[in-house]
Image: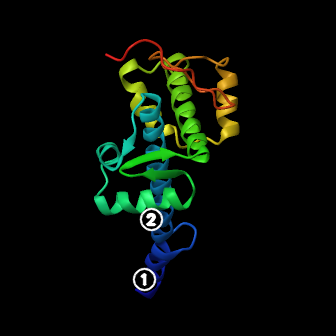
Amino acid sequence: VLATLAVVLALIFSPNVGLVAYLRKRRVILRRQHAEDALKHLLKEEYAGRHGSFSSLAGMLRLSDESLMELVGRLQRQGLIQTQGAQFHLKPEGKRVALHVIRAHRLWERYLADEARLPLLKLHEEAERLEHSLTPKQVDRLDALLGHPPQDPHGDPIPTADGYLEPPSGLPM
C-alpha cells in the first residue's frame, strides 16, 4: 500500500513529468496562445481599418471578463498594446508578434493545402492549432520550403519575414 501511494504521489507531484507539472505547463501555453490570439485579432482589426476593443476581444477569445482584464493588463505591462479610451492599439512589439502568428498561420494553411492535401474547409482550424508552435526561424524555414508563397489558399497575403503585409485590395463584402 505504501509503495502504491508513493507511485501515485510521484505521478502527481513529479517536478518534470507529474500531473501538477503538466497542468502548470498547459496553463503557460494557454496564456501565451490567448495573448497571441489577442494580438492577431488587434492586427486584423487595424488592417481592416477598425479598432480593437474589449468587446471585440471578448467575442473572439471567449474569455470571462476577469480573464480578459488580466490578459489586457499583462499585454500592457509587456509593452505590446496601449489603450486609448475603449480602444486597443498595438505597439511595435505587439505588431511584430501578431505578424509572426499570422505569417505562421497562413504558411501552415499553404503547407496543409499543398503538401498534406488537407481539404480547404479544414485548413483554418488546423492552422489555428499549429500557428503557436513555430519559432521565427522555423517559420522562415517553412516559408523557404514552400518557395516563399505570397498568399495562403484563401488568397490572403502572407506577411514577409521583415514584417511587410500587403495592403488589402478590393472592397470588403
Q: Vertical placement of 111 versus 91: above or below?
A: above
Q: Earlier in the sequence, mark 2 or mark 1?
A: 1
Instruction: State the CA–CA distance, disc 2 to disc 1.
Output: 21 Å
Horizontal arrangement in the rendering, residue 148 relative to residue 28 (left or right):
right
Q: Secondary structure at mark 2?
A: helix
Q: Secondary structure at mark 1?
A: helix
Residue 95 sits in which quadrant?
Answer: top right
- Which residue bears the numbered disc 2? 23
Q: Vertical placement of 118 versus 21: above or below?
A: above
Residue 30: percent from left, percent from top: 45, 54
For badge 1, the amino acid type reads Leu
- Which residue bears the numbered disc 1? 5
Crowdedness near tag 2: few (<14), some (14–19) or many (≥20) residues, C-alpha within 10 Å:
few
For badge 2, the amino acid type reads Leu
Give the residue at the far bottom of this rendering: 2
Q: Residue at x 29, y 47 (%)?
A: 55
Q: Residue at x 45, y 65 (%)?
A: 23
Name the residue nearer the viewer: 40 or 106. Answer: 40
Residue 7: percent from left, percent from top: 48, 77
* Quadrant where the image shows the C terminus: top left
Give the residue at the far top of this rendering: 170
Q: Residue at x 53, y 28 (%)?
A: 108
